Image: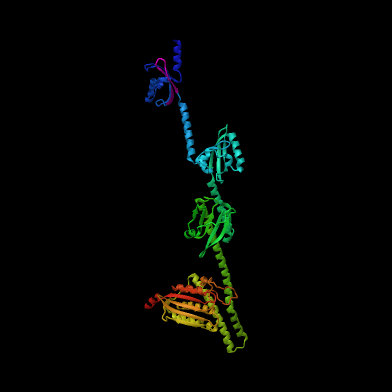
């Protein structure tokens, strides 16, 4: 009896629950823990214990007692007398550890499957596990991973072996290694820059968990910035774009392409300014869609059959050329590369514009120097005979014939100087917008006759015949008679100047629908086709040398154009070329004149 009492006392204070049922399923004994458990039973626990009584076999089950907020492991044992004993052990701590482990594993699995960063598990020889991000970085498939084809030695370039060895020593010493940059060799042979770090998850045999961040895009962006800076330096070395564009094409080929070509629009044609090829490039000429890019001003990126980029070279937002590049392999260029080349195209456009402004400034300086020399020459030319006339008056005997000849010489050359000065003043007024017109009804026939009489002495001196064909004798327009006479006189004076002795000048006047047309034609030296577009420009002359056979400042025709346009008309020149003569056509509106006449 004493032994039974002691046993009951021991069982009562056990940390585990002990419950004994008799064959009537009544509680014969329950210690303190068992009593606590039985006071918080639920339907599932009752069902499981009832099943154990019925089956009469040992059974083990785990159950969460919600009222106690505890997990218990219950083991049932059938007794020889038909009853049953239940041993109950508190396993809450174990469950919580397991739940924490499951949560940790779940978080780790989510990290791996999130594909935010490359995760890899490797032993000393090969990669044993990896997520999709890492496989994409190195270009291998999961099947190749399963076949154990990702060997560490084949993935790492030889120049990084010392860096990897240092990381392994750090892992062996501390269990972790600090992140460091290196490159991996992809399956296709290309290299990819990464940032990697690792944790030693098992020592024997060694197993490492590594994190891999793809740095390719960051490296490419850094490289693009360096290329833009270097390209800017190349473009800034000279204002001769043919030279700098050739250097730039060579630089692009040396860094990121097998072929680079630069095209520039020049008037009505497109000129290839520069082309560069990489040593490994084939002999076949790549086909670039230059026409479409120049027409639309929009870039083009193609992936097949080769990776090519064609971007416009923009100046003032207008395409003035194109930069075309062919990549080293399929898929060489992305949309980010397209934006890089577009930025380069804008810099090239700025370089073209700077070059144009530089050459225009050079040309303006050259024209200014030529003009100063020309004005000096033209002003000095009539001064020489004027001084000669003065010398004659002072030194020769004062007879009437000599006196008239000296005065005529002085007067003629003084008038030449006056015309030169007047032309310069007219150009100054035109440029400052101060040239004024006295508008009144004007008979063009009278204007033409007056102009002919003005140039008659010069034409007679060269035995040049001036013919008139005035089909409209009442051609009234609204205009400034003096300025219109200046227009016709300038055209006639030019015709006489550039027509050889014994030549012919024809002036025609004809009524057209709503306008009147004056044509001045000659059979003189004509106008070269290259110079014809510039014939009405200020200070422009086909021959600017000081020993040219014909004088003048190159202002007359510029004044003609401004005066005609100020009257609402147009003027243009025609010539078949050297020694083919020329024709100047002035067209003026007549409707204003009709209104003036009615008033």
Quadrant housing residue 167: top right
Question: Residue 79 magenta-drawn?
Answer: yes
Q: How is the image coloured?
A: rainbow
In the figure, residue 365 lies in which quadrant?
A: bottom right
What residue appears at the point 59 percent right and 37 percent down from the top-left corner?
Answer: 168
Q: Disc count in the image?
A: 0
The answer to whether residue 100 is above or below residue 301 is: above
The region drawn magenta spans 70-89
Is residue 426 visible in this depiction of the protein? no
Magenta segment, prevailing SS (helix, strand or loop): strand
Give the quarter of the figure containing the N terminus.
Answer: top left
Q: Position of residue 518 (x, y in %)?
A: 45, 77
Residue 402 visible within the image: yes
The one nearer the camera, 300 or 54, is: 54
- Please identify the quadrant where the C terminus is shown: bottom left
Q: Is residue 265 magenta?
A: no
Q: Position of residue 8 (x, y in %)?
A: 44, 14
Task: Relative to 386, say whether 284 is above or below.
Answer: above
| In the image, farthest residue toward the top | 1
Q: Residue furthest toward the bottom? A: 399
> Looking at this rendering, what residue extends furthest in the right direction?
395
Front residue of this view, candidates 246 and 439: 246
């Amino acid at each position: 009896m004493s032994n039974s009492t002691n046993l009951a006392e021991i069982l009562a204070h056990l940390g585990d629950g002990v419950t004994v049922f008799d064959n009537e399923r009544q509680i014969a004994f329950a210690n303190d823990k068992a009593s606590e458990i039985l006071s918080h039973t639920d339907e599932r626990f009752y069902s499981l214990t009832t099943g154990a009584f019925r089956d009469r076999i040992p059974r083990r089950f785990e159950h969460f007692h919600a009222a106690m907020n505890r997990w218990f492991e219950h083991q049932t044992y059938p007794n020889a007398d038909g009853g049953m004993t239940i041993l109950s052990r508190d396993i809450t701590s174990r469950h919580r550890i397991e739940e924490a482990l499951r949560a940790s594993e779940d978080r780790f699995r989510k990290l791996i499957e999130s594909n935010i960063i490359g995760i890899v598990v490797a032993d000393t020889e090969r990669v044993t596990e990896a997520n999709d991000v890492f496989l994409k970085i190195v270009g291998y498939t999961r099947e190749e991973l399963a076949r154990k084809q990702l060997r560490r030695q084949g993935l790492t370039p030889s120049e990084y072996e010392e860096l990897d060895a240092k990381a392994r020593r750090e892992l062996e010493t501390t269990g972790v290694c600090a992140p460091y940059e290196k490159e991996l060799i992809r399956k296709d042979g290309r290299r990819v820059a990464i940032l990697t770090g690792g944790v030693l998850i098992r020592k024997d045999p060694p197993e490492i968990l590594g994190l891999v961040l793809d740095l390719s895009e960051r490296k490419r962006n850094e490289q693009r910035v360096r290329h833009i800076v270097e390209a800017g330096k190349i473009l800034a070395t000279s204002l001769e774009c043919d030279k700098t564009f050739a250097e730039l094409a060579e630089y692009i080929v040396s860094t990121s392409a097998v072929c680079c070509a630069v095209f520039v629009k020049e008037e009505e044609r497109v000129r290839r300014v520069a082309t560069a090829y990489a040593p490994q490039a084939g002999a076949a000429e790549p086909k670039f869609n230059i026409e479409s890019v120049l027409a639309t001003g929009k870039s083009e990126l193609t992936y097949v059959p080769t990776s090519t980029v064609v971007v416009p070279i923009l100046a003032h937002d207008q395409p003035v050329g194109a930069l075309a590049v062919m990549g080293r392999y399929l898929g060489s260029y992305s949309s980010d590369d397209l934006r890089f080349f577009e930025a380069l195209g804008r810099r090239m456009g700025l370089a073209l514009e700077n070059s144009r402004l530089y050459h225009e400034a050079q040309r303006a300086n050259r024209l200014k120097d030529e003009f100063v020399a020309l004005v000096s020459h033209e002003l000095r030319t009539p001064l020489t005979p004027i001084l000669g006339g003065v010398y004659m008056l002072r030194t020769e005997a004062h007879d009437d014939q000599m006196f008239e000849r000296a005065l005529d010489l002085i007067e003629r050359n003084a008038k030449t100087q006056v015309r030169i000065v007047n032309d310069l003043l007219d150009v100054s007024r035109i440029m400052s917008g101060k040239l004024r017109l006295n508008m009144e009804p004007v008979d063009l026939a009278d204007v033409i006759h007056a102009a002919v009489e003005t140039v008659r002495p010069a034409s007679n001196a060269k035995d040049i015949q001036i013919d008139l064909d005035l089909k409209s004798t009442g051609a009234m327009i609204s205009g400034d008679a003096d300025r219109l006479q200046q227009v016709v006189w300038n055209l006639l004076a030019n015709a006489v100047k550039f027509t050889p002795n014994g030549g012919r000048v024809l002036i025609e006047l004809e009524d057209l629908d709503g306008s009147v047309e004056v044509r001045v034609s000659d059979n003189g030296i004509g106008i070269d086709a290259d110079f014809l577009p510039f014939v009405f420009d200020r200070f422009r002359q086909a021959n600017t040398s000081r020993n040219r056979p014909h004088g003048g400042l190159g202002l007359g025709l510029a004044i003609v154009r401004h005066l005609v346009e100020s009257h609402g008309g147009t003027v243009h020149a025609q010539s078949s070329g050297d020694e083919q003569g020329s024709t100047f056509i002035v067209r003026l509106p007549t409707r204003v004149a009709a209104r003036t006449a009615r008033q």
